[in-house]
Image (cartoon, rainbow, N blue to C red):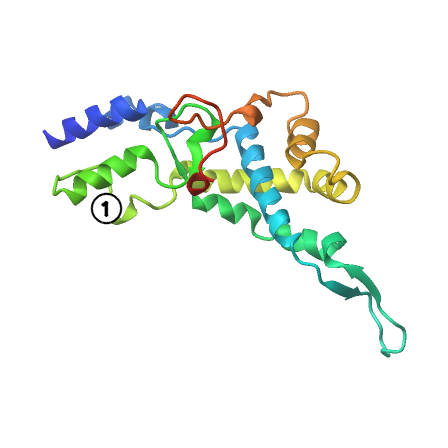
Amino acid sequence: MIFSIICAYLLFTTQVLCRDDSEINSEEDVGVKYANRCEVCKILATELQERLEQTGKVHDVIEIGYSLDDVQPKKKTKYQKSELRLIESLEGVCEKILEYNIHKERQDSTRFAKGMSQTFKTLHGLVDKGVKVDLGIPLELWDKPSAEITHMKTQCESLLEENEGAVEDWYWNHQGEVDLIKHLCTYNALKGTDDSCLNEQLTTAKGERGSADKSEL
């Protein structure tokens, strides 16, 4: 009985059907829908831009180059315009994807966002009220990264490796002139393919299109 109630709830809120194993033919049959290339590039560009904005606040002057005898002076450069800043910004950028969750109440690329989904907020609320909720996985695993999220991290690493040159080109030659997401995704990683997801934004409660709340970014 409880299983039927939960299945009905998930079907209503997330369009996920509960099926027995004999009916499973693809990942979507069990509610898994992996990110497409556009969605991966969008998240990568967003996270890298945020990281660059953070490192861009450092106004240090650093010394670069090698001096075997410490006699020849090392070249000094601003950290903001250094290769070190780019390297540190790229380091672990795809790991940030593990902070995301699937918001299955949404149908477009905004389903990938930080913060707990409305579905799981409701389910946690039921548990807090003493309602027995059985999703087939232990409660402590509810908030762990889903299959879609862990797979998107791998997709991010592959896409970044393929387009590392495009990132470097933007950093040295187009930064401040062209948006990173445009240069990396539209002009390179998604060139000649559908990039419509880049324009998708979270719909607010009033039905307006706008940026997601900071708790979900």
State whether residue 119 appears in this view: yes
Q: Residue at x 21, y 40 (%)?
A: 125
Q: From this viewpoint, is residue 17 visible?
A: no
The residue lying furthest to the left in this view is 1
Q: Which residue is mark 1?
A: 139
Question: Residue at left 20%, top 24%?
Answer: 8
Q: Quadrant of residue 100?
A: top left
Q: Position of residue 200 (x, y in %)?
A: 52, 25
Q: Residue furthest front?
A: 206
Give the residue at x 82% y 65%: 65
Q: Residue at x 67, y 20 (%)?
A: 192
Question: Is 51 rendered above or below residue 152?
Answer: below
Element under label 1? Answer: helix
Give the crowd class for mark 1: few <14, some 14-19, many >=20 residues within 10 Å. few
Residue 93 versus residue 36: which sits nearer the camera?
A: 93
| Residue 116: % across, % down | 35, 40
Image coordinates of residue 160 in percent, x first then y, are: 62, 41
Image location of residue 143, percent across then percent down:
32, 45
Q: Measured along the vertical axis of the image, is residue 10 above or below residue 95?
A: above
Q: Does residue 205 appear to the left or right of 21 in the view shown?
A: right
- In the picture, which quadrant includes the N terminus? top left
In the foreground, 98 or 77: 77
Q: Amino acid at mark 1?
A: Leu
Using the image, determine if residue 160 lies above or below residue 33: below
Q: How many marks?
A: 1
Q: In this orientation, which residue lies closer to the viewer: 169 or 50? A: 50
6 left or right of 108 in image: left
Q: Name the outermost residue toward the right.
A: 72
